Image: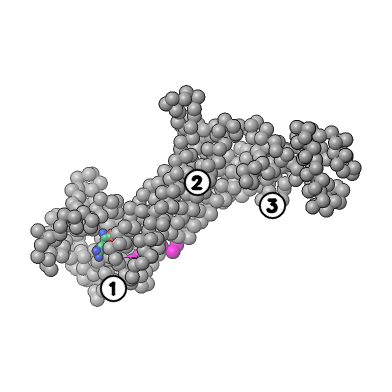
Amino acid sequence: ASNQMWGGRFASGPAAIMEAINASIGYDRKLYAQDVRGSLAHSEMLAKTGIISADDSKKIADGLKAILKEIEDGNFAFSTKLEDIHMNIEARLAELIGPAAGRLHTARSRNDQVAVDFRLWVKDEFHRVAEALKGLIAAFVERAEEHAATVMPGFTHLQTAQPVTFGHHCLAYAEMFARDLSRVRDAIVRMDESPLGAAALAGTGFPIDRHMTAKALGFREPTRNSLDSVSDRDYALEFLSVASIAGTHLSRLAEEIVIWSTPQFGFVRLSDSFSTGSSIMPQKKNPDAAELVRAKTGRLNGHLIGLLTVMKGLPLTYSKDMQEDKEAVFDAAETLDLMLAAMTGMVRDMTVNAAAMKKAAGSGFSTATDLADWLVRELGIPFREAHHVTGRAVALAEEKKVGLEKLTLEDLKSIHEGITADIFSVLSVQNSVKSRQSFGGTAPAEVRRQVRYWKKRLAKA
Ligand code: ARG
């Protein structure tokens, strides 16, 4: 049989394989609610502008609402023959209300229809991600408040660098996820325009009111260029890039959790609800959720590159290639939602082993910089020279197999005669972090100040 939508020009129907490669109903059925919403707004506008009768518009609206209910109740028969969600719904509408259904598509094309549906969906997802990010940031702010003075080693090159506080480390992640949140918000502002009424590509001769449909659908305004309206997918690319960047942050955090939860580090213990055991080794507690967050970031990156590659060679305006935008975005959205939820759970639930952190913070001569700074401050030695003197102290401590704070005053005097007992006050990790009160530094007082800042900011976010 020939196609019921464009059968006029066709003598025979498509090959089965054509139908299989063409159909998107398997995944774009996810857009059913947006499709009904878009059609309701369109049909109401068509009636208001006198393009169709109020009576037909009423029939269309009733039919669409009945279809929405059928889909939500699981009573809708989706058909691959009808290709996509738009034609599935329209065909069912014709069954339900007869010829009036044929008037819904006046002054509209599937090109602007799919563009408006997808924008509505991506916009909702952006809002979901924003909420999830806020939850994750709040979790970090809580852990930071609790651990403003918990000392841990700070690393560069994953080598012990200087002592920091765990609260400070938590707030580093609050910063990253807050930038992701601001990227989400920026993207929403850019995409908040309705493409409905661009029609196939050139606009329409019917006296439609695009401002009316834009408003009805909750968009700030209609898009300004009909060609761009049906060929643009950069809001989807922005979603995927925001997802990839947030994924990168989540993955680095996941990697730290994997390292921290090893028996060798022992900085944190994941709750039973966010870890798994081994089927053979009874002692094991594995950070599977963190590992999967790390792995799923690869999937997000893949989707971004995938859609960039789909779009890069397309001439204006619509090409069927663009149908491939949906699976990438749907899967990335589902993946990111899950990653954010799992990470928020892990961060909220994990037990922090402050003693293990403190012990590690004092190893690896982590206060060497404090020693050098003391030489600069108290003896007026240029920093470069102080660096050398301190290096000799580290070498001596290494030789004696003790920490810097366990060197005797005689040991230290043998390295530089100006050194006094006062130097021991800067060699403890506690005093080291306490001294770093510069704006944005790791001192507990500064971390507490930042916690107050975040609480205020989150209350407004
Ligand atoms: N299923 C199509 C898509 O997802 C809808 C638009 C079809 N438009 C067209 N001119 N064939 O892109």
Counting from the top left corner in percent of width and height, residue 195 is at: 33, 66
In the image: residue 394, left or right of residue 284: right
Q: Is residue 441 visible?
A: yes
Q: How is the image coloured?
A: one colour
* Span highlighted in magenta in the image: 189-195
In reply to whether residue 190 is colored magenta, the answer given is yes
Which quadrant is the N terminus positioned in?
bottom left
Residue 392, position as x, y percentages in the image: 80, 42
Specify the label residue 250 is tagged with.
2
Of discs 1 and 2, which sits in the foreground? 2
Label 1: state its secondary structure.
loop
Query: Which label lies toward us, 2 or 3?
Result: 2
Frontmost residue, 19 versus 92? 19
The local secondary structure at tag 2 comes to helix
- At horizontal 65% and vertical 38% (from top left) the residue drawn is 152
**96 relative to 386 in the view: left or right:** left
Say whether marks 2 and 3 touch (CB < 8 Å).
Answer: no
Q: Amino acid at mark 3?
A: Phe
Residue matched to label 1: 203
Judge whether residue 219 can be spotted in this image. Answer: no
Instruction: Residue 59: give x, y in percent of width and height.
Output: 17, 59
